[in-house]
């Protein structure tokens, strides 16, 4: 069975601190996709990144970076020099490459960045 | 580009009533999904569709029905609403690369 675990329910940091959001997944498939979505207080879901299981290279996009390690089934997300606008709920998700591309979501991590 | 459009944005339903949540997408995506998000929780898949005329159950389908007569539309029907169906409902579509979400429908069953 597929499962995504985000053990950190809520994290609070002061602006400019670095913060890492953890994501651990379970799947029997060798081919799959991993995602991060952001849900700001307004409620919409914003796509951040998609990685496929064959690409373990770390990725950096501005202040955001992602560390994918198949050996530990983890796909962690780091925000460098956090800002108040980063306050949101962040979801990690898993998609197996079958005929439906449906996503299985973790329970989310609420990040609060204080000024 | 409108993307994925959901209506209504908010609705209050009485116990036992029925209603349909509308979802339409203009990206010609084959794959469409309905998720629900309970307070403080992640999203759970209700139903999904891989193309017009094809639907299948997700993780939490009880109390819901769907149909997919066109590529664009994927309505979600609630029959005999119960308080446990109070949630935020998200519709999404995909070409297989990533999911595009609608802005959600906040539904309260009282």
Image (cartoon, coloured by chain):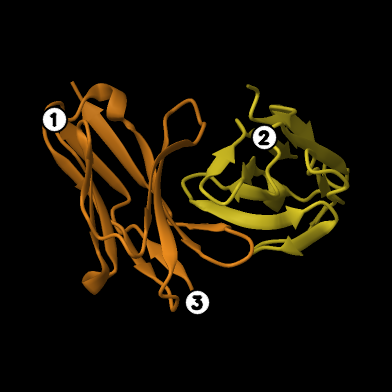
Colour of chain A as rendered: orange
- x and y percent of residue A111 in the render? 29, 38
Kindly check if marks 1 and 3 are in contact, taking CB atoms under 8 A apart as contact.
Answer: no
Res. B62 in view: no
Vertical relation: B99 (above or below) B105: below
Instruction: Name the disc covering residue B27, or none.
Output: 2
The tally of labels here is 3
Tag 2 and tag 3 share a subunit: no
Near mark 3 (Cα within 10 A), the count class, few <14, some 14-19 or many ≥20, is: few
Residue B49 percent across, percent down from the top left: 73, 55
Q: Which residue is mark 3?
A: A1
Hey, which quadrant is residue B7 in on the image? top right
Residue A105 is tagged as none
Badge 1 element = loop
Residue A92 falls left or right of residue A98: left
Q: Chain of mark 3?
A: A
Going 58% across and 58% down the picture, which residue do you hit? A102
- Specify the chain shown as yellow: B
Quadrant into which the N terminus of chain B falls = top right
Tell me if A13 is positioned left or right of A6 in this view: left
Q: Which residue is mark 1?
A: A81
């Amino acid at each position: 069975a597929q499962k995504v675990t985000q053990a950190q329910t809520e994290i609070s940091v002061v602006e400019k601190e670095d913060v890492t959001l953890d994501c651990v997944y379970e799947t029997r498939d060798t081919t799959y996709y991993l995602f991060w979505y952001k849900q700001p207080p307004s409620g919409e879901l914003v796509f951040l990144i998609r990685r496929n299981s064959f690409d373990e290279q770390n990725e950096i996009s501005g202040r955001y970076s992602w560390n994918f390690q198949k050996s530990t089934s983890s796909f962690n997300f780091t925000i460098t020099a956090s800002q108040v606008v980063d306050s949101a709920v962040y979801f990690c998700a898993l998609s197996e490459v079958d005929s439906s591309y449906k996503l299985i979501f973790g329970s989310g991590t609420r990040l609060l960045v204080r000024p | 580009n409108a993307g994925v459009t959901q209506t209504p944005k908010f609705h209050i339903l009485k116990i036992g009533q029925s209603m349909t949540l509308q979802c339409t997408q203009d990206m010609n995506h084959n794959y469409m999904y309905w998720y629900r998000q309970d307070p403080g929780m992640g999203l759970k898949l209700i139903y999904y569709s891989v193309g017009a005329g094809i639907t299948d159950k997700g993780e939490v389908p009880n109390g819901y029905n769907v149909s997919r007569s066109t590529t664009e539309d994927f309505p979600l029907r609630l029959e005999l609403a119960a308080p446990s169906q109070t949630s935020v409902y998200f519709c999404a579509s995909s070409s297989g690369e990533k999911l595009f979400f609608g802005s959600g429908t906040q539904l309260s069953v009282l």
